[in-house]
Amino acid sequence: MRFRSVGYTPLMLMAQTCALLGFACYAVVLTTLQEEWHLSNLESGLIASAFFFGYMLAVPLATALTDRVDARKVYLIGGLSATCGLLGMGLLAFNFWTALFFMAINGAGLAGTYMPGLKILSDRIQSGELTRHIAFYTAFFGIGTGFSYLCSGWILSALGWNYVFGIIALGPFTAFLIVLLLIPPLQHEKWKGSIQIRLRDIFPINKWKLVLQDKKASGFIFGYTAHSLELFASRSWLVAFFVFCAAVSGESFLLAATTLAGVINFFGVPASILGNEIALRIGRQKWVCIVMLTSAVLGIALACSTGQSWWLIVTFAIGHAIFIMADSATLTAGLVISAKEDIKGAAMGLHSLMGFGGGMLGPAIFGFVLDISGSRSSQAAWVWAYVAVVIWGVLFVIYERRNGWVTKTAQ
């Protein structure tokens, strides 16, 4: 079945939404598994981090392969890997170590679908149309993760945590089927003969050194790392935080914790797009600094709001979600524009790798601080945990302003 180039985008948006349905499964069932498996907060955070660890391991190989073969083939492998990881969590995981293994497989599966999905579009759409299609594709990341919270929460309340992973596994499998059946292969394969990928193709260390020597580009990469650390720590622990808030206040929230987290996640989609528009007017580097400092303040305010009315907690949660995402597109766009043309591909690869590296560290840092400061039954512990993840953005702003990044980028 063949489509005109414009017809590929709706299909890939559907596929991406389905592939991302497993993104928040663990965040939704975190408190349930913590009680059932007697996990510490650090262990709970490490299981969330394992997802991003699997992504980090797989994304260099996945992106290198898309330069050698049709990205459609990489996507199909990624879709099946994510499906297997989710099924393994639902059917086979029974403790900390097995959960680490299957969550890493799930993360590796996402690495095989997200960027390769973007490559599928870029290989099949005329260059004049490409920018608009890519904008929609990247925006749908927030939509897919929002639905992940919503669907996982509904399944958890109706059937139990095992069914969350088992049923949500249909999501990446559906993405696999969409690409397999509705996206035609490239008419001319990019690589003939055997595929030879060297270690330096996967980890281009020399090019990465050149990227880091470019102060303008490296500033956006380090900013993205701090941004991702805060973002994914917040997303991993937000449902557990809402559960704690409801227990402390004794007041029922308007929506279930998982539904509320999903709805709040949707605010990040327009925040990222509008944030980039503001950055174009006042300067990317200035906007990044404003957003990171504001996000830190709102994150700490959210942590301090426990015991207050639910509307105040939700207001701070929405504000925090908006400002976490308000510099996301700006950081990526800034890197793409700042990086030199001959190392731009390596710069984007390092950008993604370090971003998800921050995503890997964030949930574990959050859980570790919860453990050492009083566990998740203590309001003070939640405050310190939020401080531990928002402080990196503040430190980034202080360092880069002293280092002259803001001035250099503006020039």
Image (cartoon, helix red, strand yellow):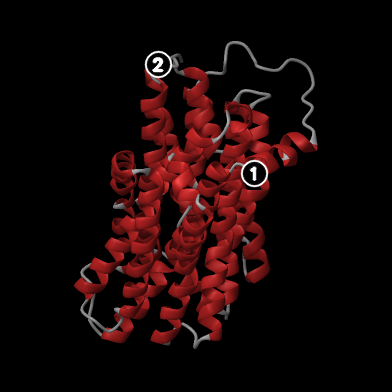
Q: Is residue 372 above or below residue 347?
A: below
Instruction: Choose between 163 and 126: the one closer to the eye.
Output: 126
Q: Give the mark, 1 or 2, whose residue is nearer the N terminus.
A: 2
Q: CA distance from mark 1 to mark 2?
A: 33 Å
Which is more toward the observer, 265 or 78? 265
Q: In the picture provided, is 174 more to the left or to the right than 360?
A: left
SS for callout 2: loop
Residue at 39% x, 56% y: name it.
Answer: 289
Residue name at image x 53 percent, y 64 percent = 362
Nearest to viewer (mark 1 / mark 2):
1
Residue behind mark 2: 128
Image location of residue 113, percent across then percent down: 54, 38
Which quadrant of the rendered structure holds the C terminus?
A: top left
Q: In which quadrant of the rendered view does residue 8 lie?
A: top left
Residue at 28% from the left image edge and 84% from the top image edge: 307
Q: Nearer the viewer, residue 104 or 142?
A: 142
In the shown orientation, is residue 401 left or right of residue 250?
Answer: right
Q: Give the amino acid type for the residue marked by disc 2 in the picture.
A: Gly
Residue at point 42% right, 79% down? Answer: 382
- Image quarter of residue 197: top right
Residue tagged 1: 213
